[in-house]
């Protein structure tokens, strides 16, 4: 992310895979990953041009977001159901847990 917040190559892999998975379930609220290069630890994703900012910064600054609850609710509903055993089946869920379950640094 930057000098103040370095990420290991393994953590970058988890971030890229999590973004790709979440985008597959909820493309309206998760930017697309165009390229992930593991050896270089590079993630290339859609550029969100201004006035887009990280929502946390806006909340800290006191900005009110009228659709935040709706958008977060839609994101949570689609990603949580999309990745659930009910949707993907037990075997796929076990494999996903194995793949993401080693991410202790998060």
Image (cartoon, rainbow, N blue to C red):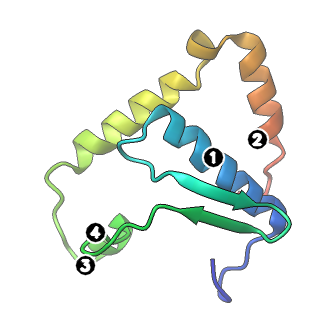
- Rendered image: mark on residue 100: 2
| C-alpha span from label 3 to label 4 | 5 Å
* Mark 1 in CB contact with mark 3 (< 8 angstroms): no
Q: Nearer the viewer, mark 3 or mark 2?
A: 2
Q: Nearer the viewer, mark 1 or mark 4?
A: 1
Q: Nearer the viewer, mark 1 or mark 3?
A: 1
Secondary element at tag 3: loop
Sequence order check: which comes first, mark 1 or mark 4?
Answer: 1
Q: Residue furthest bottom?
A: 3
Horizontally, residue 88 falls left or right of residue 90, namely left
Front in this rendered view, residue 88 or 69: 88
- Rendered image: mark on residue 81: none
> Label 3: which residue?
61
Q: Position of residue 18 (x, y in %)?
A: 63, 46
- Rendered image: mark on residue 59: 4
Secondary element at tag 4: helix
Q: Is residue 9 above or below residue 13?
A: below
Horizontally, residue 103 falls left or right of residue 19, namely right
Q: Position of residue 71 (x, y in %)?
A: 28, 43
Quarter of the picture containing the C terminus is bottom right
- Residue lying at 86% horizontally and 66% vertically, measured from the top left: 39
């Amino acid at each position: 992310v930057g000098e103040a917040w370095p990420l290991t190559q393994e953590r970058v892999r988890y971030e890229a895979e999590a973004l790709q998975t979440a985008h597959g379930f909820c493309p309206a609220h998760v930017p697309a990953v165009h390229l992930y290069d593991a050896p270089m630890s590079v993630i290339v994703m859609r550029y969100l041009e201004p006035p887009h900012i990280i929502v946390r910064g806006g909340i800290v600054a006191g900005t009110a977001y009228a659709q935040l609850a709706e958008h977060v609710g839609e994101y949570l509903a689609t990603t949580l159901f999309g990745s659930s055993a009910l949707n993907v089946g037990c075997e796929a869920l076990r494999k996903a847990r194995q793949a993401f379950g080693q991410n202790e640094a998060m």
